[in-house]
Image (cartoon, rainbow, N blue to C red):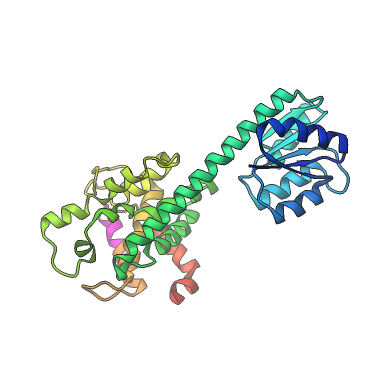
């Protein structure tokens, strides 16, 4: 793994590089924040160790720039000033950890190991998410009529969630949940998934199992508890008529995904019918709300979001 040490004092850089040698990491050095940013643009690093007081660009400016470029890149701030105000400024800038000078080298190595492990786990999660998205595209490729469905549903759901006042973290989870909501369909045989003939009740029962199958597929993810509602409950209805759990209290953001899923299905070409115009699809959502199968506020937000992004909808 690769660590970037940033300090304007050559002796301090040398001390840090020697202290990190037992960890077996590759260490690069920079004299100030500007040099550090240049290196970060050229190479991928797993951790940044930076001094606070430096010429050209100080540690706080560097941290802000680093986090703007890569929010997940951990940064440890080194300072001889242990005051609470300094730490608060560091936290506001985005520092992940602090070490006071004079440094305890054993503590330094422990903190660095901890942050590198966090970065490694983050990379594993990102790789797993990429793998899942590839699987999701494989599901969509099984049926030409559903190509791009996940991306469109994610877009509609995010627009709706923004109207509902969702937080950035909620939007992030919703996006991933929406992209993966149908991943359980990978277990459905192609001839059933295409649905180009009247399905038997047994085949419909097979299809209705896909939220549970998707839930099982996502269990290895650390983010599973946050993504589970979208994958498992996107066919639930507030009147209790949905599946697989027959819920009567369905989270609003899950319903935003449900509305997006229904709308995209209605406005897309299917083997058994032509697509509906956007206004007719919105009327169908309004009927769902009137019958208690969708929250009225969600449908209102969905309509408002589509009108706000009308140019994209018409182009799409």
Quarter of the figure with the N terminus: top right
Residue 213 or 189: which is nearer the viewer? 189
Q: Main secondary structure of the magenta part?
A: helix
Question: How many numbered circles does the render carry?
Answer: 0
* Residue 39 image point, x, y percent: 75, 52
**Is 288 part of what is drawn in magenta?**
yes
Left or right? Give the position of 275 relative to 26: left
Location of residue 136 by image quarter: bottom left
Q: Residue at x 75, y 37 (%)?
A: 89
Q: Is residue 45 in view?
A: yes
Residue segment shown in magenta: 286-292
| Location of residue 218 with respect to 151 vertically, above or below | above
Residue 101 or 246: which is nearer the viewer? 101
* Residue 215 image point, x, y percent: 32, 44
| Location of residue 213 with respect to 105 vertically, above or below | below
Q: Residue at x 40, y 52 (%)?
A: 132
* Residue 160 image point, x, y percent: 45, 57
**Is 42 part of what is drawn in magenta?**
no
Quarter of the figure with the C terminus: bottom left
Q: Residue at x 45, y 39 (%)?
A: 222
Left or right? Give the position of 158 relative to 194: right
* Residue 262 image point, x, y percent: 31, 61
Residue 59 or 90: which is nearer the viewer? 59
Left or right? Give the position of 241 relative to 96: left
Q: Residue at x 44, y 71 (%)?
A: 313
Q: Is residue 297 in view?
A: no
């Amino acid at each position: 793994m690769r660590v970037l040490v940033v300090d304007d004092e050559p002796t301090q850089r040398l001390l840090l590089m020697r202290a990190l040698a037992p960890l077996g990491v590759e260490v690069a050095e920079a004299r100030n924040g500007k040099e550090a940013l240049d290196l970060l643009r050229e190479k991928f690093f797993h951790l940044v160790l930076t001094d606070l007081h430096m010429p050209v660009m100080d540690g706080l400016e560097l941290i802000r720039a680093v986090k703007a470029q890569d929010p997940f890149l951990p940064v440890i701030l080194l300072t001889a000033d242990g005051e609470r105000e300094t730490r608060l400024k560091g936290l506001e800038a985005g520092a992940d950890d602090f070490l006071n000078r004079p440094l305890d080298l054993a503590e330094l190595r422990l903190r660095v190991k901890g942050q590198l492990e966090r970065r490694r786990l983050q990379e594993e999660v990102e790789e797993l998410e990429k793998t899942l998205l590839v699987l999701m595209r494989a599901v969509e490729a099984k049926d030409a009529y559903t190509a791009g469905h996940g991306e469109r549903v994610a877009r509609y759901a995010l627009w709706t969630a923004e109207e509902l006042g969702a937080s950035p973290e909620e939007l992030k989870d919703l996006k991933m949940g929406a992209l993966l909501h149908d991943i359980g369909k990978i277990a459905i045989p192609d001839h059933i998934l295409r649905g180009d003939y009247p399905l038997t009740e047994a085949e419909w029962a097979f299809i209705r199992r896909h939220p549970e199958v998707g839930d099982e597929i996502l269990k290895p993810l650390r983010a599973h508890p946050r993504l589970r509602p979208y994958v498992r409950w996107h066919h639930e209805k507030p009147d209790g008529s949905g599946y697989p759990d027959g819920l009567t209290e369905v989270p609003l953001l899950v319903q935003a995904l449900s509305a997006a899923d229904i709308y995209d299905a209605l406005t897309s070409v299917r083997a058994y019918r032509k697509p509906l115009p956007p206004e007719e699809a919105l009327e169908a959502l309004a009927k769902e709300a009137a019958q208690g199968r969708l929250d009225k506020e969600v449908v209102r937000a969905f309509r408002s979001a589509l009108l706000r992004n009308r140019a994209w909808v018409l182009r799409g």
